[in-house]
Image (cartoon, rainbow, N blue to C red):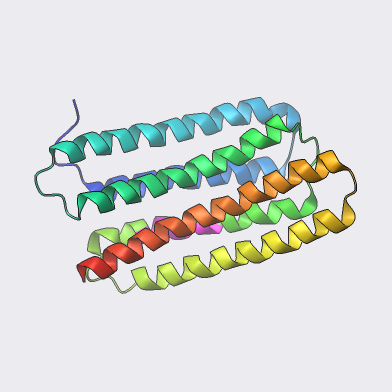
Amino acid sequence: MAKKGMNYFESFTKGVEYGCKAAQLLHACFAQYDPSQLPRRMEEMHQIEHAGDEMKHEMMECLLKEFLPPIEREDIMELSSTIDDVTDSIEDVLLRLYMFNITQLRPDAKAFTDVIMRLCQALEKMMGEMHNFRKSSLLRDLVIEINHMEEEGDRLYTDTMRRLYTEESDPVTVMAWTTLYDHLEKCCDRCEDVADVVERVIMKNT
């Protein structure tokens, strides 16, 4: 039975913590890449993703019974969904490394995991302030910081794709890495999506 009186802001923070754990795992995988360890890494990642899903479902069950939630129901639903999308997008990268049988990482791919880690850490700070969203002076600065980091991810995506298509001639490699870079860039986009929802919540309620 779902518990009553859920602290949604604590749940948002917990959801982002799962995203941070996923980002840390991806970063560790890229830092010392070993294809033989991918099945184990995938299982670790799936456990993180599954825990995030369970928490989201619990939140939705509580929301169905909530008489007066702290912010509008659709905002809670959208924010919990976009937070969950961050973890899902990170897991997708690991899955595709395995699916495409990537035996060696391109050197520039590792830079993406640094950006993703920093984005998730900024989201964690943001959610720590969310309970005080009507008065917090830090939230808007964090939204801007996340926007700037996502733009950094966009520039990295442009540069890495350019190098891929000018330096690589094998069509299978080009196909695989086009998809991988797409998914790495999508991780950055999903983090910015969370910040965009937070910004809308602030504007609607202040």
Q: Residue at x 73, y 39 (%)?
A: 33
> In what quadrant of the picture does the C terminus appear?
bottom left
Against 65, residue 181 (above or below) is: below
Viewer-proximal residue among 18 and 85:
85
Residue 12 visible in this rendered orientation of the protein: no
* Residue 77 horizontal/vertical position (percent): 29, 46
Against 71, residue 60 (above or below) is: above
Q: Residue at x 68, y 50 (%)?
A: 181
- Residue 108 image-quadrant placement: bottom right
User: Was residue 120 drawn as part of the magenta stretch in this picture?
Assistant: yes
The stretch in magenta equals 118-126
What count of labels does the image hold? 0
Against 92, residue 194 (above or below) is: below
Viewer-proximal residue among 162 and 206:
162
> In what quadrant of the picture does the N terminus appear?
top left
Viewer-proximal residue among 33 and 87:
87
Residue 204 visible in this rendered orientation of the protein: yes
Q: Residue at x 31, y 33 (%)?
A: 57
User: Was residue 119 drawn as part of the magenta stretch in this picture?
Assistant: yes
* Residue 124 horizontal/vertical position (percent): 41, 55
* Residue 152 horizontal/vertical position (percent): 61, 66
Against 103, residue 179 (above or below) is: below
Q: Residue at x 70, y 52 (%)?
A: 110
Q: Residue furthest left?
A: 67
Residue 141 in the figure: left or right of residue 167 = left
What secondary structure do most residues of the magenta stretch adopt?
A: helix
* Residue 117 horizontal/vertical position (percent): 55, 54
- Residue 28 image-quadrant placement: top right
